[in-house]
């Protein structure tokens, strides 16, 4: 006896991946009125690791406005720490031009330069807010094993279950399976460097000052956080080194690593104590050649991974989510589907320009500050001194606005406005 296979489940938007990118896309798109299904490979959300991920995010002012209006930041356990100023300099071992450093301070509009949040706190807040939104469905333990473009939409095989949707959004990270299914090529370059990330306490206050130290083997950033439960000042460390050196450093005891960090900071933050073994993250540049296909878009690390020296990675992801939501909202307002060409092509055109510009900037800065050739080192340091002392504050603030807003006009969410009909 012949039995027909069940018809595929019909969905409007399917988001593959329930990390920081997937949740940002879901919450941004919720305001469009679309029905959204988020597929999470994890079977639970306990996340109770003995050695939790210490990574942090420096939210730009527009990202801060977006997450505030989506009620995410109010759901965080810790209040975001504002960065009032940033000091950029070079390591003491690098030949210098006297006075060669660069300072950035708050813009005239009163915004902080950025706001520090812990990634694990942000993820928990996203999950908490999402569960109360009626048009978002989070499905745990769901893995996409196949995809096929059809005239009626994108057909997904998920745990041997068939789904068909108007639009699939790849938020499944730098090793994206959705991107592979689409056949999207990537541009990739290994930096042969790794980042060591850890929290550390220090005896001197950070005064909400972020420090960026450029070194020949890679930059080091110390980013202000709040205080520990016992009242100590706390900062987040991102220390980039050659991969082999980074592996050696990550294997040190907490005491020896704290001593090595103290030597690098030369007493700037007083006595230092690293709270846990640093996490080790290899660094590379990765850019997808296309961010859109019929019935599909790439978002976050599935589309772009850049050098962390400017702290812009997740801000680019939030701009992805806000811009995609803007296009979907505008399409639905005139009776079009979320997969309309105006959505996918409009998203690609706006996001590729912004991302490639930021990737070029961070890659160029990494190359510029990664040379120890004395004439170039002196010229580079003289340039820092010239920019810091001669460039008008208005010009510095223009640079800050570019890092905050990118190359395209700000969509509503990044201006702190919800999407409403």
Image: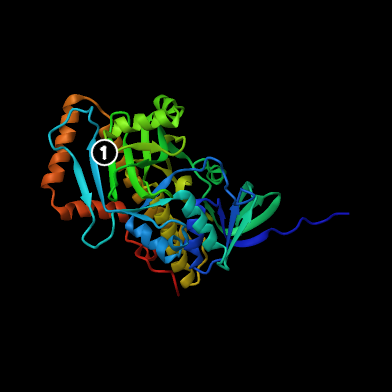
Depth check: 276 or 282 in front? 276
Q: Is residue 393 above or below residue 145?
A: below
Looking at the image, can residue 192 be seen?
no
Q: Determine whether 341 is above or below 146 in the image.
A: below
Q: Nearer the viewer, residue 14 or 401?
A: 401
- Whole-percent x and y of residue 316? 39, 51
Q: State the quadrant of the C terminus.
A: bottom left
Quadrant showing the N terminus = bottom right
Using the image as rendered, state which of residue 167 and residue 23 is in the foreground: 23
Residue neighbourhood size for the residue with mark 1, other residues' Cα within 10 Å, grouped as few (<14), some (14–19), many (≥20): some
Q: Which residue is depicted at the point 27% across and 50% down?
A: 207
Residue drawn at the location 69% of the way across and 49% of the way down: 159
Residue 132 at x, y percent in the picture: 56, 66
> What residue does disc 1 label?
268
Question: Which residue ends up furthest to the right in the rendered image?
Answer: 1
Dot 1: what SS? loop
């Amino acid at each position: 006896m012949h039995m027909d296979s069940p018809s595929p489940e019909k969905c409007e938007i399917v988001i593959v991946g329930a990390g920081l990118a997937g949740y940002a896309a879901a919450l941004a798109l919720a305001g469009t009125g679309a029905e959204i299904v988020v597929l999470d490979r994890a079977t639970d959300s306990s996340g109770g690791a003995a050695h939790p991920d210490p990574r942090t995010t420096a939210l730009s002012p527009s990202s801060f406005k977006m997450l505030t209006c989506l009620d995410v930041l109010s759901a965080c356990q810790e209040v975001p720490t504002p960065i009032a100023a940033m000091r950029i300099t070079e390591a003491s071992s690098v030949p210098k031009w006297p006075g060669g450093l660069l300072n950035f301070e708050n813009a005239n509009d009163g915004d902080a330069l950025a706001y520090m949040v812990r990634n694990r706190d942000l993820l928990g807040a996203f999950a908490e807010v999402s569960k109360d939104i009626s048009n978002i469905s989070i499905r745990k333990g769901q893995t996409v094993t196949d995809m096929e473009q059809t005239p009626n939409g994108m057909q997904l095989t998920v745990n041997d279950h068939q789904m068909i949707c108007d639009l699939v959004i790849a938020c499944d990270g730098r090793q994206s399976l959705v991107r592979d299914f689409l056949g999207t090529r990537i541009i990739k370059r290994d930096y042969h460097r790794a980042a060591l990330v850890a929290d550390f306490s220090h005896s001197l206050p950070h005064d909400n000052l972020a420090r960026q130290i450029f070194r020949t083997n890679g930059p080091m950033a110390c980013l202000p956080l709040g205080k520990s439960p016992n009242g100590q000042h706390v900062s987040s460390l991102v220390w980039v080194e050659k991969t082999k050196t980074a592996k050696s450093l990550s294997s040190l005891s907490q005491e020896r690593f704290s001593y090595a960090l103290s030597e690098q900071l030369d007493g700037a933050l007083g006595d230092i104590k690293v709270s846990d073994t640093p996490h080790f993250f290899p660094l590379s540049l990765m850019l997808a050649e296309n961010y859109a296909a019929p019935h599909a878009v790439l978002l976050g690390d599935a589309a772009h991974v850049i050098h962390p020296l400017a702290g812009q990675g997740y801000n680019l992801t939030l701009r992805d989510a806000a811009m995609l939501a803007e296009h979907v909202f505008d399409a639905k307002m005139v009776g079009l589907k979320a997969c309309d060409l105006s959505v996918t092509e409009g998203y690609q055109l706006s996001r590729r320009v912004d991302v490639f510009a930021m990737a070029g900037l961070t890659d160029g800065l990494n190359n510029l500050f990664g040379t120890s050739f004395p004439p170039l080192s002196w010229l580079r340091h003289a340039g820092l001194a010239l920019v810091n002392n001669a460039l008008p504050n208005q010009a510095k603030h223009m640079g800050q606005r570019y890092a905050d807003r990118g190359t395209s006009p700000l969509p509503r969410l990044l201006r702190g406005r919800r999407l409403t009909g």
